């Protein structure tokens, strides 16, 4: 979804439900029906996916990242029960520096005996779609779930349970080696799964806060989620003179448990 489409959808929601809201007092318990949330926070690992391997530089992922919810809407169809959809976009400086880190690692690993040229398929600042990552994120999480509502005066607590999809890209990488004082040349090529890397995810979370104004609440979020990675990166070492090849497989199969902490605002539209 482009930024223009997203903005138009937000304006449509605001105009539609804003006209219907009339003069309801949303500081009273259980009065709101439609809420839109703006939130930013941090993802912290309970378990780490990155293990310090050279193939870590090819994952568009970081165990620690900042996130913002590009879309988050809750619809209460009952006094206590509701449904929520949210999309979480995550970024980190580590992800932004993956290619340079990969090149540095290759140089330090092989420079004593070889002339080294390394590259990856990661986007760089000159690429056309580079700026879109700041809106859509490097790590994508989308959830749909049930919400239970507790409200008392100006305070509220919303426990939630959701299911969804998490995704991040796996790039390819290559290292070209020219042996010093000889004509021997080698190529190391790293390739992961094609067609994207989408994983089923579960999340238990709680939103809580204070009703600052009639239509605006201060909000804090705590979310504990689970996803399982199950992919392999193939490492092929080729002798360009003899055409011989050696193959190694690096496995990323494990359970992962991120903890997300965020703060923001809730706006009531109906």
Image (tube, rainbow, N blue to C red):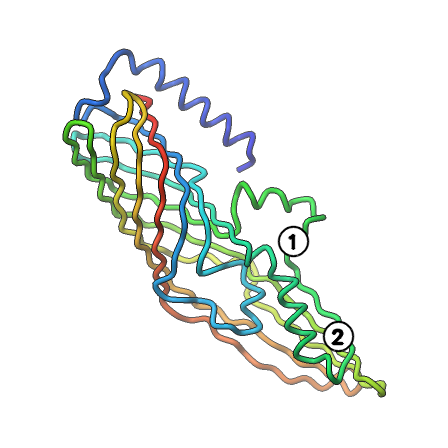
Q: Which residue is mark 2?
A: 116
Q: Which mark is residue 259?
A: none
Left or right, residue 187 beside residue 160: right
Image quadrant assignment for residue 181: bottom right
Q: Neighbour class for label 1 at 10 Å: few (<14), some, many (≥20)? A: some
Earlier sequence position, callout 1 versus callout 2: 2
Which residue occupies 24% across, 25% down?
32
Q: Circle 1 sits in a helix, a strand or a loop, which is it? A: loop
Q: Which residue is mark 1?
A: 123
Residue 3 in the image: above or below residue 136: above
- Of all residues shown, which one is farthest toward the left? 152
Instruction: Answer with the quarter of the image where residue 265 lies.
Output: top left
Q: Classify 10 Å Cα crowding around label 2: few (below 14), some (14-19), many (20 and above).
A: some
Residue 199, given in percent of the width and then of the height, sits at 42, 58
Q: Position of residue 192 (x, y in %)?
A: 56, 67
Kindly report the distance in space between the C-alpha atoms of the residues bearing marks 1 and 2: 21 Å
Residue 270: image location, x then y, percent:
29, 21
Label 2: state its secondary structure.
strand
Q: Is 22 above or below relative to 226?
A: above
Percent of width and height locating residue 92: 52, 53
Which residue is depicted at the point 56% across and 30% down? Answer: 4
Q: Residue at x 36, y 50 (%)?
A: 164
């Amino acid at each position: 979804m482009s930024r223009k489409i997203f903005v138009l959808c937000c304006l449509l929601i605001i105009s539609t439900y804003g006209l219907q809201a009339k003069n309801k007092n949303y500081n009273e318990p259980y009065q709101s029906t439609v809420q839109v949330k703006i939130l930013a926070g941090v993802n912290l690992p309970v378990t780490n996916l990155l293990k310090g391997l050279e193939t870590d530089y090819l994952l568009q992922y970081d165990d620690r990242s900042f996130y913002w919810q590009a879309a988050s809407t809750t619809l209460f169809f009952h006094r206590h029960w509701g449904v929520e959809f949210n999309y979480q976009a995550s970024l980190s400086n580590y992800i932004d520096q993956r290619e340079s880190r990969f090149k540095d690692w290759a140089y330090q690993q092989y420079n004593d005996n070889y002339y080294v040229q390394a590259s990856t398929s990661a986007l760089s600042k000159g690429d056309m779609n580079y700026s879109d990552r700041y809106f859509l994120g490097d790590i994508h999480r989308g959830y749909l779930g049930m919400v239970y509502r507790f409200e008392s005066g100006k305070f509220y607590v919303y426990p939630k349970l959701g299911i969804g999809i998490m995704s991040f890209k796996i790039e390819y990488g290559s290292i070209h080696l020219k042996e010093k004082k000889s004509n021997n040349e080698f190529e190391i090529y790293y390739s992961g799964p094609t067609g994207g890397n989408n994983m089923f995810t579960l999340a238990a979370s709680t939103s809580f806060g204070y009703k600052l104004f009639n239509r605006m609440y201060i909000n804090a979020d705590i979310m504990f989620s689970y996803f399982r990675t199950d992919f392999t990166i193939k490492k092929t070492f080729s002798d360009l003179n003899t055409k011989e090849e050696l193959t190694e497989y690096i496995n990323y199969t494990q359970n992962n448990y991120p903890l997300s902490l965020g703060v923001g605002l809730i706006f009531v539209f109906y």
